[in-house]
Each structure stands twice: as structure tokens, then as C-alpha cells.
């Protein structure tokens, strides 16, 4: 007899849910999960490996539970007068977000975001037993101060997740909206800046708003700009009291000694690790321009991906690209698909494959 999930005494609030499931297919051109498709430079990889080798000698002992050296390194990277006491980290920013929701959401509480937004937010909220509440955006996915504030006042959430720039749309979020949402909110406000390094160089970060706002946290990740998705390292900056709340819910020694060593070495090489960002931004802009020429409707993006409309049958286009060895993402928005900016060669492969399918409807 085959056992199914329905046969197990699963939590009632998890029944019927589906796990996160971006396809992991071994295609030659994978542009579906917004990774940095450039490998870690050889010189940096060997530097990281040296540090991992040293850490390995002490791996019989538990690692530094407070990952102090890593927190100092993140504070140095972020700047804005931040110190180690302002920093938290986890195995990917998904774990960091989970820590926040474990501490500030949970059963009987609500977590709010402006949809469409990052598909993990509802799953992370539900995982802690909280209820996900989806707000709305303009058809162009932008948000004005008044509309954002009105929705926050209406729903009065315990936790608000603001994705800036927003995934899957690429839309930037002005700081005045974040400030107004914070003022209107009673609860925690998280600004998820997973793609901040791909925004225009002079664009302000929500890190500038942290001072005097103890309910605000700004999360970042090494998965995208740093080309470190497989290492699983995310982090955030907030008031030291906010960090104390996260210590209540993390597992002891949650960041392995090898992860800490790898991340510290990568941060020491930050300028080299981030050297491909400009190239990726150039490919992103090339994707937008070419999509437009092909008759599609790309949305403005401050990230390393482009969401484009004007796709008559997204499932069919997705499949036709798949058959040509190119994996992109159907994010479930009608008549839209999302593509990550890859290397110049990968980007060319995507654009050529799309052009060969025929132009937009
Ligand atoms: C990719 C992404 C992350 C990063 O997740 P990790 O767990 O750090 O790999 C976080 N937030 C958003 C919106 C993302 O798109």
C-alpha cells in the first residue's frame, strides 16, 4: 500500500499546501531562478578553499554560535555605520526571513505583502502558522504612498514584507513608500533587498532608514550578486534588539563552520565577486530592448531578471524554449514570463530561441 501525505497526521493548516517547486532541469541554459550564472572567479575560489581547509581542522568542535567575525564582515560590507550587533545571518535569506517570522508571526498573526511578490513569502508565513494576506499593486506593479498606507491600515498586519526591487516584477520601491508604510504599521517591516546590487549605483537603500526605526529590518543575500547561491548565505541589518529576538528562535550553531569560513573569504573578495554585476545589468537591459523589438512588453527592472508581458500562451512559449534547451520561469501571471539575465552567450541563446518561436501575439 502506498502511503500519501493525506494518511499522515499533518498539521491541519498545512493540508493542501504545495512546496516551493521551481523546476531544476539539467538544461544547457538555465535562466529560471535568478542565479548569477557567472561562476566564482578561480582566484577567489582558491582563496575560499584555503579558509575552508583551515576551518575543517576544527570541525570536531561546534562553530562560533554568534558568527562574530562574519557579522563584522557583513557590517563592513554594508557600511552605513552598521556594526556586528546590527547584523544577523542564516543559511540563505530564506532562513533569515523564517527566523523573523518565527519570532514575530506565528499562529493567530498575519503577514502582509503587495502581490505579485516573492513566492516564498506565503510559504514561510504558513510554515510558522501565520496567515498570509496579499495586498494589490497597480497594473504596472508600482505602489504609491497613499495606496500602500491605505492597505496597511486596512489589514493591520503583524509583519509586512516589502520586496525592493520586487521579485518577480523587477519594480523598484521608493524609500518614501517604505517610510510611510513603517509609520502606518504597528508591526515589523522587512525590506527584502535581495537584488539591491543590480539597482542603479546611486539608488538609495533602506539601510539609510534603519536609524531610529527598531521595527524595521533590511535583508540581503549572497545568492544573487555574489554568485554564492549554492553556499546558502543570507543576512540582515536591524536594531540590536531586533537581532536579540532572532536569537530566541534560531537553532544553536545554525551556521556551519564551513559556511562561515566560505562567506568571510568571499566578502574579503567582494570587489572581485561583484565584478560581474555591471555585465549582468548590461545583459538585462539588452534583454529588455530586444524583447520590445520582438513585440513583447518588458517591465522596467532594477534586478537581474526581466518580467515580460504580451505572451499569448506562456505555457506554450515556456515549453518551446525548454525544447530549445532554455529554461525560464512561468511565474503564474497571465500572459507573462520571467527570464534571468545570464552571461552574454546565455542571453543570446535565450533571445535567439525566443525569436525562432515567432514574435509576440
Ligand atoms: C532569491 C531571493 C532571495 C534569496 O534567497 P536565498 O535564500 O538567500 O537564496 C530572497 N528574496 C527574494 C525576493 C529573492 O528573489
Image: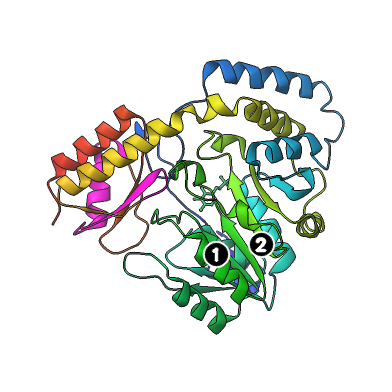
- In the rendering, at what x and y percent does residue 135 appear? 47, 74
* One can see residue 124 in this view: yes
Q: Nearer the viewer, residue 202 or 318?
A: 202
Count of labels in the image: 2
User: In the image, which disc is placed on residue 279?
Assistant: none
Q: Is residue 236 above or below residue 191?
A: above
The answer to which quarter of the image holds residue 215 is: bottom right
- Return the residue at label 1: 178
Secondary element at tag 2: strand
Q: Is residue 104 left or right of residue 297?
A: right
Q: Which residue occupies the extreme right position in the image?
A: 61
Q: Whole-percent x and y of residue 85?
A: 79, 47
Q: Which segment is the magenta one?
A: 301-326
Q: Quadrant of the N terminus?
A: bottom right
Q: Quadrant of the C terminus?
A: bottom left
- Mark 1 or mark 2: name the one nearer the start of the chain: 1
Name the residue carrying label 2.
Answer: 216
On whether residue 269 falls in the magenta region, the answer is: no
Q: Residue 226: where, in percent of width, then height? A: 54, 34
The quadrant in which residue 209 appears is: bottom right
Classify residue 111 as left or right of residue 323: right
Q: Residues within 10 Å of mark 2 (few under 14, many from 20)?
A: many
Neighbor class of circle 1 (other Cα within 10 Å; few <14, some 14-19, many 20+) is: many
- 310 and 130: which is toward the camera: 310
Residue appearing at x 50%, y 41% in the figure: 197
Q: Position of residue 288 (x, y in %)?
A: 27, 45
Q: Which residue: 51% across, 31% down?
A: 274
Would residue 322 be visible to someone looking at this image? no
Amino acid at each position: 500500500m502506498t502511503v500519501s501525505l493525506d494518511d499522515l497526521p499533518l498539521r491541519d493548516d498545512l493540508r493542501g499546501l504545495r512546496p516551493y517547486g521551481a523546476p531544476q532541469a539539467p538544461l544547457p541554459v538555465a535562466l529560471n531562478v535568478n542565479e548569477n550564472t557567472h561562476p566564482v572567479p578561480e582566484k577567489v575560489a582558491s582563496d575560499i578553499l584555503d579558509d575552508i581547509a583551515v576551518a575543517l581542522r576544527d570541525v570536531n568542535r561546534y562553530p562560533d554560535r554568534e558568527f562574530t567575525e562574519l557579522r563584522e564582515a557583513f557590517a563592513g560590507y554594508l557600511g552605513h555605520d552598521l556594526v556586528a550587533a546590527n547584523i544577523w545571518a542564516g543559511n540563505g535569506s530564506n532562513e533569515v526571513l523564517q527566523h523573523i517570522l518565527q519570532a514575530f508571526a506565528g499562529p493567530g498573526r498575519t503577514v502582509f505583502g503587495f502581490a505579485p511578490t516573492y513566492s516564498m513569502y506565503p510559504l514561510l508565513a504558513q510554515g510558522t502558522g501565520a496567515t498570509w494576506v496579499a495586498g494589490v499593486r497597480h497594473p504596472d506593479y508600482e505602489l504609491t504612498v497613499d495606496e500602500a498606507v491605505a492597505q496597511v491600515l486596512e489589514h493591520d498586519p503583524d509583519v509586512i514584507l516589502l520586496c525592493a526591487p520586487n521579485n518577480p516584477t523587477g519594480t523598484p520601491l521608493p524609500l518614501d513608500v517604505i517610510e510611510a508604510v513603517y509609520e502606518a504599521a504597528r508591526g515589523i517591516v522587512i525590506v527584502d533587498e535581495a537584488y539591491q546590487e543590480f539597482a542603479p549605483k546611486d539608488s538609495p537603500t533602506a539601510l539609510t532608514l534603519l536609524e531610529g526605526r527598531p521595527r524595521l529590518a533590511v535583508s540581503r543575500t549572497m545568492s544573487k550578486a555574489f554568485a554564492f547561491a549554492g553556499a546558502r548565505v543570507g543576512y540582515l541589518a536591524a536594531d540590536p534588539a531586533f537581532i536579540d529576538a532572532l536569537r530566541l528562535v534560531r537553532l544553536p550553531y545554525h551556521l556551519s563552520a564551513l559556511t562561515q569560513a566560505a562567506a568571510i573569504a568571499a566578502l574579503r573578495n567582494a570587489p572581485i565577486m561583484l565584478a560581474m554585476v555591471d555585465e549582468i545589468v548590461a545583459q538585462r537591459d539588452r534583454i529588455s530592448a530586444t524583447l520590445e523589438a520582438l513585440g513583447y512588453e518588458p517591465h522596467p527592472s532594477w534586478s537581474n531578471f526581466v518580467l515580460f508581458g504580451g505572451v499569448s500562451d506562456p505555457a506554450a512559449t515556456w515549453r518551446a524554449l525548454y525544447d530549445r534547451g532554455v529554461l525560464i520561469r512561468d511565474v503564474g501571471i497571465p500572459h507573462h514570463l520571467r527570464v534571468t539575465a545570464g552571461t552574454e552567450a546565455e542571453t543570446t541563446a535565450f533571445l535567439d530561441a525566443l525569436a525562432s518561436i515567432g514574435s509576440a501575439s
